[in-house]
Amino acid sequence: MAAELFKALQGHEVVVAAIVAFLVTAFMILTGRKGGQHVNPGIKKDQPKVVDSFTMKDIEDLMKKDKNGVVAICRCWRSKNFPLCDGSHTAFNKTCGDNVGPAVLKK
Amino acid sequence: MAAELFKALQGHEVVVAAIVAFLVTAFMILTGRKGGQHVNPGIKKDQPKVVDSFTMKDIEDLMKKDKNGVVAICRCWRSKNFPLCDGSHTAFNKTCGDNVGPAVLKK
Ligand code: FES
Ligand code: FES
């Protein structure tokens, strides 16, 4: 069985080498990709799960401080002012063609 | 120049084929990867930017309906009940080693 396979492949070393290289490369890249698929690339990476809590009082205080009287909660995980949105989603969407934006709380 | 290069490569077809396959595969995967880095893989992909708005009245009504009296806003973009969190972040974090979770609004 193995001998027959070996014989059939003789003379096709180039094709075999190309296929092997293809598989090895694909495996390496797809395995290494895992980290790149994180939604959150950098916020509180020492925590197992990032949950941010706000009381209604917190929200009201933040609304008072905001010039438009709203609270925008970041959902792109790129804000320098996380957990609040600072508009960074725009640059992020442009870079990779995504369509994320904040959740907005209004009066 | 090209003739010399050709001569030098003769007898090394296997190596050349492997290198070419490596480069082609790497290029294909890394180019195709772009879409994979989206934070949002599937919500309202027909919209240029997904923004969800809530009034304070909306939040209060949602709090009343919730058994724990809280409103959890999804930030992993995997909830079947988006824009609200349905706990899907747990499975997502497990799959890829991320650490995302909701923003929680409380009384
Ligand atoms: S900065 Fe993240 S949603 Fe706006
Ligand atoms: S389901 Fe998305 S944060 Fe919980």
Image (spheres, coloured by chain):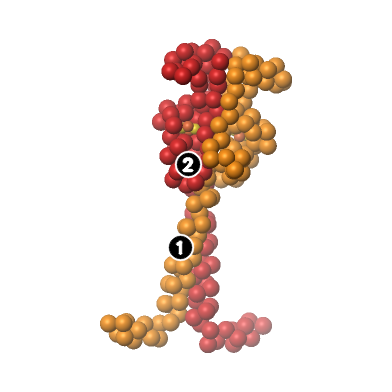
Chain colours: A red, B orange
- At horizontal 44% and vertical 31% (from top left) the residue drawn is A87
**Residue shown at 52% from the left, 30% from the top:** A102
Name the residue nearer the viewer: B101 or B73: B73
- Res. A47 visible in picture: no
Rendered-image quadrant of the C terminus of chain B: top right
Residue A18 is left or right of residue B105, and the answer is left
Q: Are the residues tagged 2 and 1 within 8 Å (C-beta)?
A: no
Decide if residue B5 is in sight here.
Answer: yes
Question: Can you say which quadrant of the picture contains the N terminus of chain B?
Answer: bottom left
- Mark number displayed over residue B62: none
Residue sitting nearer the eye, B84 or A43: B84
Q: Position of residue A97 (x, y in %)?
A: 49, 46
Residue B12 location, quadrant: bottom left
Which three-letter amino acid code belongs to the residue tagged 2?
Asn
Q: Does mark 2's beta carbon lie closer than 8 Å to ligand 1?
A: no
Image mark 2: chain? A
Above or below, B103 against B64 in this view is below
**Relative vertical location of residue A93 with respect to residue A14 in this rendering, above or below:** above
Mark 2, other Cα within 10 Å: few <14 / some 14–19 / many ≥20: some
| Quadrant in the picture for residue B96 | top right
Is disc 1 surrounded by few (<14), some (14 to 19) or many (20+) residues within 10 Å? few
Q: Which mark is residue B27?
A: 1
